[in-house]
Amino acid sequence: MSFLTKRVGRMKDIFKFSQQPNFENPSLIVGWQEDTGKLSPKVIEYLNKKIKTESFCEIEPVGFFSLGAVAIENNIAQFPESKFYCSKRNDLVIFKGSEPRFERYRFLNLISDLAQHYCKIRELYTISGTISAIAHTGSRRILAVFNQQEFQKELQGYELVDMNWKGPPAISSYLLWIAKKRDIPGVSLWTEIPFYLAAGEDFQAIKTTLSFLDKKFNLDLDFAELDEQIGSQNAKMAQLREDDPDINKYIGMLESGLSLRGEEQMELTKKVTEFLEED
Amino acid sequence: MGIKLYKQPELKDSIMFCGWPGIGNIGISAIDTLRAVLRAEEFGEIEPWDFFDPRKVLIEKGLLKDLEFPSNKFYFQRVNNRDLIFFIGQEQPTDGGTRYAEGQKAYRMASLVLDVAEKCGCRRVYTSGAAVTQIHHTVRPRVWAVPNSEKLINELNQYENTIFMSAIEGRKGQGVITGLNGLLLGVAKKRGLEAICLMGEIPYYLQAAPWPYPKGSKSVLEVLVKILGINIDLSKLDELAERVEEEIDEFLESLYRTEAIPPEVRDEIEKLRHIEPTELGPITEEEQKKIMEHIDELFDQEGRKDERHL
């Protein structure tokens, strides 16, 4: 752990190591706990389960999160987590964390410090979902933002779609910018999620993202579990379309590339969310 | 975290003017107008990332081009053999998500600004902000002056339309200056540096409004040009002030017409129209609170926006 002692001594209190794995220029995959269509946490959870990772280090929450209370979700008390994972494969490091409420720059620099100086990563991948006016019956594209042109060229052939955007930055873009300043090649992957599935889970988008990682890192992932969830969700959606002509009409319009009015979008989102939550 | 100076201008006995966003943007508009009119040249900045989150990301053809942070820039100019430094910050740093500067970050920012001031041989610092008070928007705002040393009182006494806290009813010379405008005065005092805060008045029913209040900025600017012994063209600020006043009139009229605010609140605001600022206490604290409850609610509804982050 020489990087800790070489750098600021105070950092020893911020990083909590449970083991000290060795890496060989791994890639870092970063996912956040809160995300559209729960894409980011689900992708990381699936990945962690299938390649059998273990947490080896975590960032202490003090100073980054409001610790005056705990949030309750689905009856369970939550607590912010910021953990690094490793597996027997020494070419991958995974980070899953809650978005810090305070000191975001310092927090993202801590992730980068550990990734760069301890793991000696060669590249960074961030995973997120983005709302899109598409139907769930179609395919999901992965929009991509690179921080270096050379890296962009390197990943040609993976069917990533170049993104254009000007607006408020998400935490993944902030991390990508910090990586750029450190000369770490990085890409933020933004998988499309039909807007009416954004409040729940979009298993097809989760699979699309995992398929990219599977191909990129030769993970040989088993998708059986996910395929079952996709099949089940699609069957439920087909049932809803059959039961509700308006929903069928709206999804049909999206399938034909037509856009919906604001109130139609609201109705579709409300009914789909309620219907999927019932089960 | 730190100061980045692109050049080291040779300055002596300089005066620094600091502006940040605040109520009605009175202070920053006054200082930034002066900076622009005098064509001060940028010479440095405070690196923003330790203080602020980025505001905007620019992505083109799949490449991250830039991340935009609120800027904190220094400028200088020589006017009538006097070296002037300007500091313009686009945001106030906070630790706890409040609108105005507070906590360690604010103290660090104030310290860095004054580090540059001292490096540039600065002998006095001016900050500027808003004084929320019971005036009508058609009335000429006065300027409340708060120095950080007693020896500056006499000097400030000579400026027209300028008052001290002791002249405000019920305050007995006491009060609070929130945000960096106040903090900088205190940190300067700690360093033995003279500092003065000039606050342009703004009607309390407009303190939450999303618009600037150029009338207040103009009053501050009138004092600043007197201090510097210069003449500048304020016609653009006058035009803006006129336009904003018309918009406020229209806004209030529409509220009265649609009864979005109760008639008694309207009467209380209108009472102020005919009262000179020097006449004391046209409405009570209780009445003021009642007005604010209604007006703040209306401004809150106007300002809400939903934006996607990528």
Image (spheres, coloured by chain):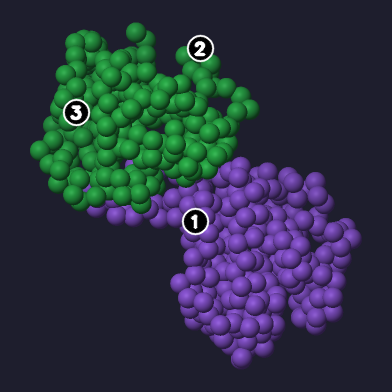
Which residue is disc 2 drawn over? A75
Q: Which amino acid type is marked by label 3?
A: Phe
Q: Nearer the viewer, residue B73 or A6?
A: A6
The chain assigned the colour green in the figure is A
Chain hosting mark 3: A
Q: How far across and how far down the image is residue B190, in percent?
A: 76, 62
**Left or right: where does residue B250 sit relative to residue B151?**
left
Q: For mark 2, give the secondary structure.
A: loop
Residue A250 visible in the current orientation: no
The residue that appears at 16% across and 19% down in the rendered structure is: A220
Q: Tell me the chain of label 2.
A: A
Spatial separation of the CA atoms under disc 3 and disc 2: 37 Å
The reply to whether the C-beta atoms of the residues labelled 3 and 1 are less than 8 Å apart is no
- B144 up-or-down from A109: above or below: below
The amino acid beneath tag 1 is Pro
**Tag 1, which secondary structure?**
loop
State the residue position of label 3: A217
Of B276 and A32, the residue lying toward us = A32
